[in-house]
Image (spheres, helix red, strand yellow):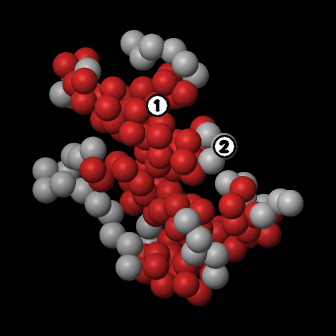
């Protein structure tokens, strides 16, 4: 039996709820959708929805409390990217347990190969690339 809340899929009527709440928050805060805060808010909206916050009012309340997680120097920290990485892992796998395992595998690989990361690079891009390559069964470059 198909259970939408456990499937990992977003049905059209669910997407309408997500998009409506997201647009309401973006408009109220005067956030540019293409900004870092707009992207984080979109990811957080999906994460909340996928983790069980299905009611539009509850989703809106949780999003109103949202603030962009950034370190003091304006650069993203790995811990700040965990929701982002979890969302990517969820989109690449069939189950929450597989997504958690993929996220852990990615972080383990990143820690073991931190010398491959160049300090001026984009941490998020590097971690997502590692995750995709690990998921595809390739050894990350």
- Mark 2 or 1: in front is 2
User: Residue 9: horizontal and vertical position, in percent?
Assistant: 72, 55
Tell me the element at label 1: helix
In the foreground, 138 or 141: 138
Please report the residue visible at 33 percent of the width from the left and 69 percent of the height from the top: 67
Residue farthest toward the right in the current orientation of the protein = 1
**Above or below, comparing residue 120 to residue 91 in the picture:** above
Q: For mark 1, what is the residue?
A: 131
User: Residue 61: horizontal and vertical position, in percent?
Assistant: 48, 84
Judged left or right of residue 106, residue 113 is: left
Report whether residue 46 is seen. Answer: yes
Please report the residue visible at 44 percent of the width from the left and 67 percent of the height from the top: 31
Residue 94's mark?
A: 2
The residues bearing labels 2 and 1 have C-alpha atoms spaced at a distance of 15 Å
Displayed quadrant of residue 93: top right
- The quarter of the rendered structure image containing the N terminus is bottom right
**Above or below, comparing residue 74 to residue 122 in the picture:** below
Tell me the element at label 2: loop
Please report contact status of discs 2 and 1: CB closer than 8 Å, yes or no: no
């Amino acid at each position: 039996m198909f259970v939408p809340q456990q499937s990992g899929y977003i049905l059209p009527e669910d997407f309408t709820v997500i998009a409506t709440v997201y647009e309401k928050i973006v408009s109220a805060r005067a956030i540019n959708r293409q900004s870092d805060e707009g992207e984080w808010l979109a990811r957080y909206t999906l994460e909340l929805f996928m983790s069980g916050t299905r009611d539009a009012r509850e989703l809106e309340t949780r999003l109103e409390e949202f603030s962009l997680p950034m370190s003091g120097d304006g650069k993203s920290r790995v811990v700040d990217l965990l929701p982002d990485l979890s969302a990517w892992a969820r989109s690449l796998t069939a189950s929450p347990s597989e997504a958690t395992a993929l996220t852990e595998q990615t972080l383990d690989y990143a820690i073991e190969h931190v010398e491959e990361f160049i300090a001026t690079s984009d941490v998020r891009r590097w971690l997502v690339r590692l995750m995709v390559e690990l998921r595809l069964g390739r050894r990350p470059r």
